[in-house]
Image: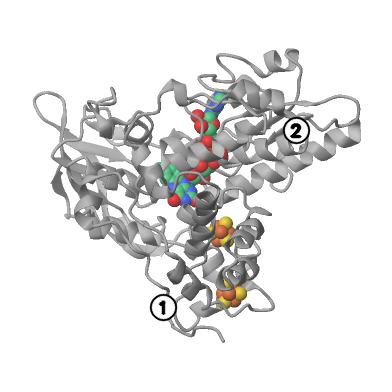
């Protein structure tokens, strides 16, 4: 008999004092007993509506049923059939918009906590693998990794048996190491391709590494996934901007025949208001990269400082804005989050909004900045803002905000972080002018296959869709890789 408790089993959270001052992971994960109890809330619906809500169609009732029966390893195997990164997706997927939104238990109560159960299965598998537990992984993050801990790429490479696709092994270049590139590279390597990933930054992982903070996604988990790719023989060339340090033609000359572009959407949008270039005004990309990738939160142990003043204002209402606000809070600032619509319209994950508010981020809703004001040294001292009201729905279906006349006021801030959206990274596409692009700057690729107008060139993830989600990018990377395999198996 299913457990008919109408609400989800709560997620244990880190102690609030630590949440406000440290980068330790906030959501602690279900223990065994809680996971079994939550799994018993699933009705095992025959028509599986939840599966239709998952972009990679994880076999949800089957994996949950395995957890309910105590078969955690089986649950993990079931999830891994369609989702290569369950420990990551279980933590960051916007489940309330995807699988859980379709769960029938949500009609008269709360849906089954599918994401939490997915994370439980993945974390349990990591533990039983003999690897470090997530807690220990978190602590290891307190120390920057030393070069002696780098994986032994050469020996892994030698041990890799490439399946011959016809007479020769095809060399595939993956450009960008975010979820799209990582999942595409994994699929290609497993199917016998000789794969190299080229990454502009000094660490692989894309947004998983430089954007989403440690307190939501321990970097040790991302590193573990990347190491497992390396053990499949995938080479990762960091500090390599394709289109600048090397070109696609150089790669062709080097024998690469297939290309998967996963360059993401890391180009920040600006408010385009006076004062945006003042000292103390950051884009969220720079702010988060300094804190997460360059470990500014560990300064002076890590060597990148960041100036987070006493009063930080973050502008935006998505995941990026929540992450920036929660990072600033942990760096000791008093934080306001300024969003031009209401809380219900915020695109961030529900859990991130809740956590930000619980931790003390103050929400200035229905508020829009119109100018940044400087002090005598040219540093931001305030944002002049105007109050908004919601009018009729716009093209996206959301009610359009409009300014209320005479409602202007100054919001004091010595740091401002702009988090109002990102568009596709332009460097690579500019270097290949013959590659078809959309009107808004994305790569024009078939959404199902990733095929572009150039032979042998595929694209996936945010570079194609614009800023989206981890699971969508992963699913697209995998599908594009499968298409590459089909193309080369047919042509050899
Ligand atoms: P990315 O992750 O952006 O990776 C692209 C990679 O390509 C980067 O490493 C970049 O350096 C590299 N690159 C770019 N140009 C070149 C070049 N010319 N040569 C070599 N390398 C290049 N999604 C969720 O589902 N849940 C969340 O909670 C969530 N939170 C987010 C928080 C933040 C702060 C941000 C920014 C995004 C968040 N997202 C979230 C969105 C999600 O992370 C992205 O949709 C996803 O990472 C896209 O994957 P991708 O592989 O397409 O691109
Ligand atoms: Fe839900 Fe994401 Fe897991 Fe799919 S991958 S079942 S959407 S948590
Ligand atoms: Fe279980 Fe909900 Fe899916 Fe039904 S819809 S099978 S209750 S998770």
Q: Give the structural element (helix, strand or loop) at label 2.
A: loop
Q: Quadrant of ligand 3?
A: bottom right
Confirm or deny contact between disc 1 and disc 2 (CB under 8 A). no
Q: Give the structural element (helix, strand or loop) at label 1.
A: loop
Q: Residue at x 53, y 77 (%)?
A: 40
Q: Residue at x 71, y 27 (%)?
A: 159
The picture places residue 424, in percent across and down from the top left corner, at: 53, 35
Horizontal placement of 220 versus 177: left or right? left
The relative height of residue 7 versus residue 464 in the rendered view (above or below) is below
Label 2, ligand 1: CB separation under 8 Å: no
The picture places residue 335, in percent across and down from the top left corner, at: 20, 47
Task: Give the residue number, with chain letter if any, for mark 2.
Answer: 453
The picture places residue 289, in percent across and down from the top left corner, at: 37, 32
The reply to whether residue 74 is in sight is yes
Task: Give the residue number, with chain letter if any, for mark 1.
Answer: 7
In front here: 292 or 260?
292
**Colouring used for the render:** one colour
Query: Which numbered disc, 1 or 2, marks the residue that appears first in the sequence?
Result: 1
């Amino acid at each position: 008999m299913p457990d008919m408790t109408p609400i989800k089993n709560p997620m244990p959270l880190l102690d609030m004092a630590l949440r406000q001052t440290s980068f330790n992971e906030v959501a602690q994960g279900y223990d065994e007993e809680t996971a079994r109890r939550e799994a018993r809330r699933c009705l095992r619906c025959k028509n599986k509506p939840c599966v239709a809500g998952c972009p990679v169609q994880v076999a949800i009732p089957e994996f949950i049923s395995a957890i309910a029966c105590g078969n955690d390893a089986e649950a993990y195997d079931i999830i891994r059939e369609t989702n290569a990164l369950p420990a990551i997706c279980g933590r960051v997927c916007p489940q309330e918009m995807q699988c859980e939104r379709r769960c029938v238990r949500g009609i008269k109560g709360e849906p089954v906590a599918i994401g939490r159960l997915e994370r439980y299965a993945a974390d349990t598998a990591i533990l039983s693998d003999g690897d470090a537990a997530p807690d220990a992984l978190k602590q290891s993050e307190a120390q920057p990794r030393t070069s002696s801990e780098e994986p032994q790429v050469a020996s892994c490479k030698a041990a890799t048996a490439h399946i011959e696709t016809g007479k020769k092994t095809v060399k595939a270049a993956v450009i960008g190491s975010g979820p799209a590139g990582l999942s595409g590279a994994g699929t290609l390597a497993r199917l016998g391709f000789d794969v190299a990933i080229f990454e502009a930054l000094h660490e692989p992982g894309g947004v998983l590494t430089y954007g989403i903070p440690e307190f939501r996604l321990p970097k040790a988990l991302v590193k573990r996934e990347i190491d497992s790719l390396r053990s499949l023989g995938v080479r990762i060339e960091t500090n390599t901007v394709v289109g600048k340090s090397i070109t696609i033609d150089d790669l062709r000359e080097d024998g690469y025949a297939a290309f998967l572009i996963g360059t993401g959407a890391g180009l920040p949008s600006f408010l385009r208001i006076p004062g945006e270039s003042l000292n103390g005004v950051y884009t969220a990309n720079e702010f988060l990269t300094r804190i997460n990738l360059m470990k500014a939160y560990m300064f002076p142990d890590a060597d990148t400082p960041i100036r987070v003043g006493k009063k930080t204002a973050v502008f935006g209402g998505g995941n990026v804005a929540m992450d920036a606000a929660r990072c600033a809070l942990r760096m000791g600032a008093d934080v306001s989050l300024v969003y031009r619509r209401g809380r219900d319209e915020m695109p961030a994950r529900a859990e991130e909004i809740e956590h930000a508010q619980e931790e003390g981020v103050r929400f200035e809703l229905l508020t829009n900045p119109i100018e940044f004001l400087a002090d005598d040294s040219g540093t931001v001292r305030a944002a002049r803002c105007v109050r908004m009201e919601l009018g009729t729905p716009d093209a996206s279906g959301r009610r359009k905000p409009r300014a209320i006349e005479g409602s202007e006021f100054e919001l004091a801030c010595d740091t401002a972080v702009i988090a109002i959206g990102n568009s596709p990274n332009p460097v690579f596409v500019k270097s290949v002018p013959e590659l078809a692009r959309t009107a808004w700057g994305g790569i024009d690729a078939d959404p199902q296959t990733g095929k572009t107008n150039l032979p042998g060139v595929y694209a996936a993830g945010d570079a194609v869709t614009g800023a989206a989600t981890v699971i969508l990018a992963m699913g697209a990377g995998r599908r594009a890789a499968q298409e590459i395999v089909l193309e080369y198996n047919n042509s050899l």
